[in-house]
Image: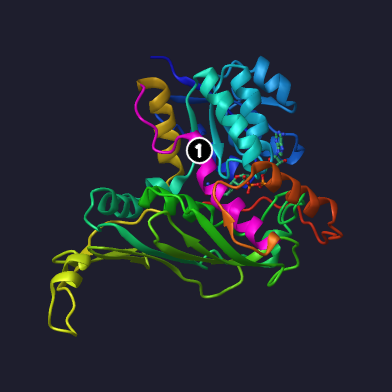
């Protein structure tokens, strides 16, 4: 089987890492063939860090039509993911998009329809799905060992960002350039893991978000959302980029116990019987079900970007299943959009939200903006080891 010819579009923090992985031959069955960047300094970086065979394009159209690539990895800012993916599908390319799937579900649903009709392999870089820690959590829930879910809580405050991060690019942390803050960028991984591990989406959301609470930015850097599920289970998500030291604690309570993931450790508090059964049968007044504390030895791996790229290539070459199908990108985005909408409307919202209403409200934020971004440094940051 010949190598899959890959093109990378967007050579910033993340695209550069992807280029390096491909260029070093870390992805079996793939060959870095072309890159596309409108940024001269990033083109110079590509020339210095790849061999002379990599074709360099400044224009999207030529990149898609003249590069000879089979597949494209899209690592541009969020708004352009569905736009570029649709162009790639129209040219018959396989696509791997960086997260988020987009900024609003309206055009992400269009992207998903385009993916379906063209039949190419479509993945999304939810690299945390490749973390053995969360794979084990998913397994404990999906296998029924935790029982019916009663409550989920996730505190995601360990993705601290200083002002210089937000100042590194013009598009960051504005409604027009990024379309959201901590929820859409950093905590989106956890929103995906929340629905992926539990296998269910919330039905109702109420949220409070604070824009520019800790930074000179116009989008939110601190948010808390209350979730309600179809079966009456509840949840709370708290995300912030302004707390240090931060916490990353995911707790899921079910009828047969509790799972706690914190400090990259997984503890399963397993009941010896169903709590509901105990409740209806126990006659002693103050008792509670017996519980065993099990430390599950699983090694946490945070970065995992190479695993997702390899899995996507394998899906192209061997028709193996995708760990993170592109069409599933809309789920975390739906939760994120619902959290923003609830905060903007100051009311509880039902999921799925109205995509047109969300789009309209987002446009109002963009059009009403008086925010002026100062001190943009145009810096490319080293993201290796981040997640
Ligand atoms: N999966 C992860 O862990 C992870 C980590 C970091 C970033 N990301 C995602 O990667 C994306 C990019 O983030 P970043 O931090 O690399 O941003 P960045 O600003 O460092 O890089 C984006 C690059 O895209 C270029 N670009 C923009 N539009 C283009 C176009 N139409 N054609 C060609 N080049 C174009 C810009 O010039 C810039 O060089 C974001 O959507 C972000 O959410 C994912």
Instruction: Name the quadrant containing residue 78.
Output: top right
Residue 228 in view (yes/no): yes
Instruction: Describe residue 195's horizontal placement relative to residue 61 as left or right.
Output: left
Residue 181 in view (yes/no): no
Instruction: Name the quadrant containing residue 290.
Output: bottom left
- Residue 90 % position (x, y): 63, 18
The N terminus: image quadrant: top left
Residue at the spot 44% in from the left edge and 40% down from the top edge: 306
Residue at the spot 68% in from the left edge and 32% down from the top edge: 83
Instruction: Name the quadrant containing residue 91.
Output: top right
Instruction: Describe residue 282's horizontal placement relative to residue 55 as left or right.
Output: left
Q: Which segment did they paint magenta?
A: 319-344
Looking at the image, residue 226 lies above or below residue 64: below
Residue at the spot 45% in from the left edge and 46% down from the top edge: 127
| In the foreground, 130 or 273 | 273
Looking at the image, residue 163 lies above or below residue 124: below
């Amino acid at each position: 089987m010949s190598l899959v010819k890959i093109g990378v579009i967007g050579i910033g923090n993340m695209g550069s890492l992807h280029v390096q992985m491909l260029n070093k031959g870390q992805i079996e069955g793939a060959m870095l063939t072309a890159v596309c960047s409108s940024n001269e300094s990033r083109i110079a970086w590509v020339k210095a860090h790849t061999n002379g065979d990599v074709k360099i394009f400044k224009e999207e159209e030529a990149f898609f039509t003249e590069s000879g690539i089979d597949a494209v990895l899209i690592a541009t800012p969020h708004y352009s993911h569905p736009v570029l993916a649709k162009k790639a599908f129209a040219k018959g390319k396989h696509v791997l998009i960086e997260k988020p799937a987009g900024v609003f579900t309206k055009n992400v649903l269009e992207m998903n329809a385009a993916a379906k009709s063209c039949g190419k392999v479509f993945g999304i870089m939810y690299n945390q799905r490749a973390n053995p820690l969360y794979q084990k959590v998913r397994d404990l829930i999906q296998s029924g060992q935790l029982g019916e879910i009663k409550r989920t809580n996730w505190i995601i405050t360990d993705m601290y960002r200083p002002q210089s991060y937000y100042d590194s690019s013009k598009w960051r942390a504005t409604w027009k350039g990024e379309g959201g803050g901590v929820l859409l960028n950093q905590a989106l991984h956890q929103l995906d893991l929340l629905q992926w591990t539990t296998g269910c989406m919330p039905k109702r959301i109420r949220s409070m978000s604070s824009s520019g609470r800790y930074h000179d930015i116009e989008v939110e850097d601190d948010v808390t959302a209350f979730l309600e599920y179809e079966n009456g289970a509840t949840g709370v998500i708290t995300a912030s980029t302004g707390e240090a030291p931060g916490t990353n604690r995911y707790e899921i309570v079910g009828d047969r116990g509790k799972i706690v993931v914190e400090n990259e450790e997984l503890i399963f508090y397993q009941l010896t019987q169903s709590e509901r059964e105990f409740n209806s049968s126990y006659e002693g007044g103050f008792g509670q079900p017996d519980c065993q504390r099990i430390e599950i030895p699983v090694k946490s791996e945070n970065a995992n970007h190479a695993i997702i790229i390899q899995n996507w290539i394998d899906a192209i070459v061997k028709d193996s299943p995708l760990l993170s199908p592109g069409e599933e990108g809309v789920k975390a985005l739906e939760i994120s959009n619902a959290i923003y909408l609830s905060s903007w409307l100051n009311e509880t919202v039902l999921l799925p939200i109205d995509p047109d209403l969300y789009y309209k409200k987002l446009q109002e934020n963009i059009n009403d903006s008086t925010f002026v971004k100062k001190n943009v440094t145009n810096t490319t940051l080293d993201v290796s080891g981040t997640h």
